[in-house]
Image (cartoon, grey):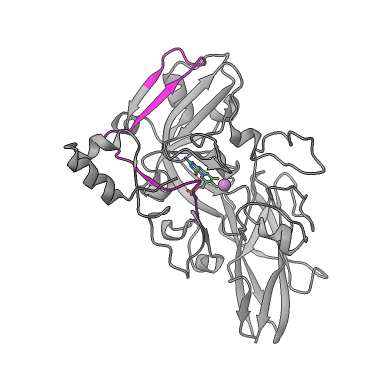
Amino acid sequence: MTTVSRRTVLRGSLAAGLAGPALLMGAPARADGPIVKPLPPELFTVFGTNAETRWEAMQGMGYHTPIDRFFVRNHTATPLIDHRTWQLDVHGSGVRRPLRLSYADLRALPTREVSAFIECTGNGRSFFTSQQGQAVTGTAWKLGAVGVARWRGVPLSHVLRLAGVTREAVDVMPVGLDAEWVDGGVNRGHVRRPLPIAKALDDVLLAYEMNGELLPPDHGFPVRVVVPSWIGIASIKWLGSVEVSSEPLSSPWDTNYYRLFGPDYPPEGSAPLTQQVVKSAFELPFPATLASGPQVLGGRSWSGGGRIRHVEVSTDGAATWHRAIPHGVAGGEGWLRWRFPWRPQPGSYELRARAVDEHGHTQPETAEFNTLGYLFDAVVRHPVTVV
Ligand SMILES: Nc1nc2c(c(=O)[nH]1)N[C@H]1C(S)=C(S)[C@@H](COP(=O)(O)O)O[C@H]1N2
Ligand SMILES: [Mo]
């Protein structure tokens, strides 16, 4: 696939005598690289079209992940979309009144705000290999493919009701406006994944603001879907259309990917993945070097299964566990911040943190193997050298 720089596109359009915005109505322009925002090495680890937040960059931050350090997961590249020509089409056999909304139309609808994490299904994938000795494919994330933001926008349920969603509707398919995705020579089309109607009518948001600012290009400008507690792929960025269907819908993102595959699963894989699992992370470099003496470690734990109830930390190889001190309140769709006072002697350590959510979901010693490395929920052994 060729990536045309924005400058080239604009020059081409001038030569053809077209106005810039008119051009943007077709294939959106592309930025010069796959990600638009700066990716300084102290905040991010870059993997091709994706960038992972460094957990030490969360030290001293508030509840929400600032936009300048929020991870980015792009199948191809961030498109530059003109909100003045953008339209959202809501159509299909599950609606009585198909809709076409402009950006201004959407902004005029009732809004809601939610503090929710978006987390890649493969977050923690590298630990299948480094902790469990298992080969998996996909981006070798550590624990930084997650962030919590304050999302504001229009409830999807509101838009579906405006379109006259019927009792027969079963699935809702949001489709992205970024380039079609080609994987191993196969064109999978635009990034899209069906949502069951029950979830679509529950707490899903069509978000146009992130942490009180306009949604940035890399995170889906002008409008993205936010599906609280679910795997990141559900939260389609650069939304262009929503199909509502009275028949089940499918896409490669719920058949070929985002299921569990491997020896423990049928050939077609598990059921399509939905909720996220429980995870915990220290706000430290990986590996970390710390000075000896009294200090307070920080960390965060989250779960797609509900509010975090408590967090325990071990500094002695899982021999003893001690409660971490909660800092602020646990968000239902966000995370719990915590602190852990520690007074280490010089030496080598493996720090562990494990959390339990309100429904009793915990973090095991070993995550269930699956070839695509999804849903790593095991306790991560965080190497620390104290000098
Ligand atoms: N249109 C579109 N939506 C998308 C993606 C994409 O590549 N294209 N990536 C998905 C995946 S796999 C994840 S984990 C999240 C990442 O959201 P973020 O880049 O805002 O952190 O967006 C999801 N939505
Ligand atoms: Mo993802």
320 sits to left or right of 22: right
Corner quadrant of residue 19? top left
Q: Main secondary structure of the magenta part?
A: loop
Q: Nearer the viewer, residue 77 or 174?
A: 77
Spot occupied by residue 294 in the image (x, y as percentages of width and height): 63, 82
Q: Is residue 126 left or right of residue 37?
A: right
Quadrant of the image occupied by residue 85: top left
Q: Residue furthest front?
A: 185
80 relative to 64 in the view: left or right: left
Does residue 349 appear left or right of residue 284 in this picture? right
Q: Residue at x 49, y 23 (%)?
A: 243
In the rendered image, the quadrant that contains the N terminus is: top left
* Residue 175 vs residue 204, the one in the foreground: 175
Q: Is residue 96 above or below residue 39?
A: above
Residue 346 sits in which quadrant? bottom right
Q: Quadrant of the C terminus?
A: bottom right
Above or below, 94 relative to 17: above
Q: How many labels, in total? A: 0
Q: Position of residue 362 (x, y in %)?
A: 75, 52
Q: Look at the picture and state if 361 lies above or below 190.
A: below
Highlighted magenta segment, given as a residue range: 71-99
The x and y percentages for residue 153 are 41, 37
> Residue 278, how many percent across, how many down?
68, 51
Residue 80 magenta:
yes
Seen at 56% across and 41% down, the residue is 185
- Residue 368 inside the magenta-drawn segment: no
Q: Residue at x 80, y 68 (%)?
A: 318
